Amino acid sequence: MAKTKAKTNAMRLLDSENIPYKIQTYEISDRLIDGVSVAKKVGEDPRNVFKTLVTQGHSGTLYVFVVPVAEELNLKKAAATVDEKKVEMIHVKDIQKHTGYVRGGCSPIGMKKEYRTVIDASAQTIDHIVVSGGKKGMQIICDSADLVKAAHAELADIIR
């Protein structure tokens, strides 16, 4: 298990489920916190680094989609996956209210509430996955299957 002074909800959840992970930190003072920049900073292939996107369906239900940082979420595929007419990204100002995390530090695990979570199927083709550790400047690295388990997620083709 990784050891750090201040554990995030994501780390506490992984610890509680005895899921091994590593923490990788990176500098944020340059304000380059987009996914591809973060992948470079932590020395990872962008295909292994995933971003967490929070959406709202036509029904009003919130959903979490996790996709490679260099890819875009296909909103039509995403909506079909969760049986919605359509899904739209929530406003940045609402991310913390719904998840407990800030933009640039939103982890797919350990949110204030558990939302239906879908991880892009490409996660099955990589040996490890890198996602936000729950705050800016911190990434969690773990086995892809372990992330699916921890997030109670499903896998689907949801990118363009």
Image (cartoon, rainbow, N blue to C red):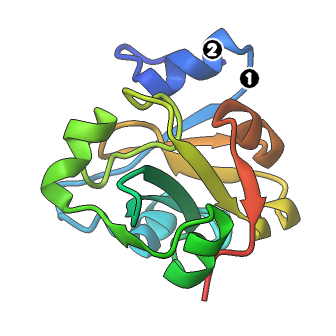
Q: Which residue is mark 2?
A: 15
Q: Residue at x 36, y 72 (%)?
A: 88
Q: Quadrant of the N terminus?
A: top right
Q: Residues within 10 Å of mark 1 (few under 14, many from 20)?
A: some
Query: Where is residue 30 drawn, in percent x and y?
Result: 18, 64
Specify the amino acid type for callout 1.
Ile
Query: Where is residue 121 drawn, in percent x and y?
Result: 78, 67
User: Which image quarter: residue 151?
Assistant: top right
Judge from the rendering whether residue 107 lies leftward or rightward of residue 117; answer left or right: left
Specify the amino acid type for callout 2.
Asp
Q: Where is 148 relative to 15, above or below?
A: below
Disc 1 element? loop
Q: Which one is nearer the viewer's eye here, 63 or 4?
A: 63
Q: Which residue is mark 1?
A: 19
Judge from the rendering whether residue 111 lies leftward or rightward of residue 104; answer left or right: right
Judge from the rendering whether residue 59 lies leftward or rightward of residue 90; answer left or right: right
Q: CA distance from mark 2 to mark 1?
A: 6 Å
Q: Tell me how many marks there are.
A: 2
Residues tagged 2 and 1 counted as in contact (Cβ below 8 A): yes
Judge from the rendering whether residue 15 lies leftward or rightward of residue 84; answer left or right: right
Q: Residues within 10 Å of mark 2 (few under 14, many from 20)?
A: some
Query: Where is residue 45 drawn, in percent x and y?
Result: 65, 71
Q: Residue at x 58, y 72 (%)?
A: 78
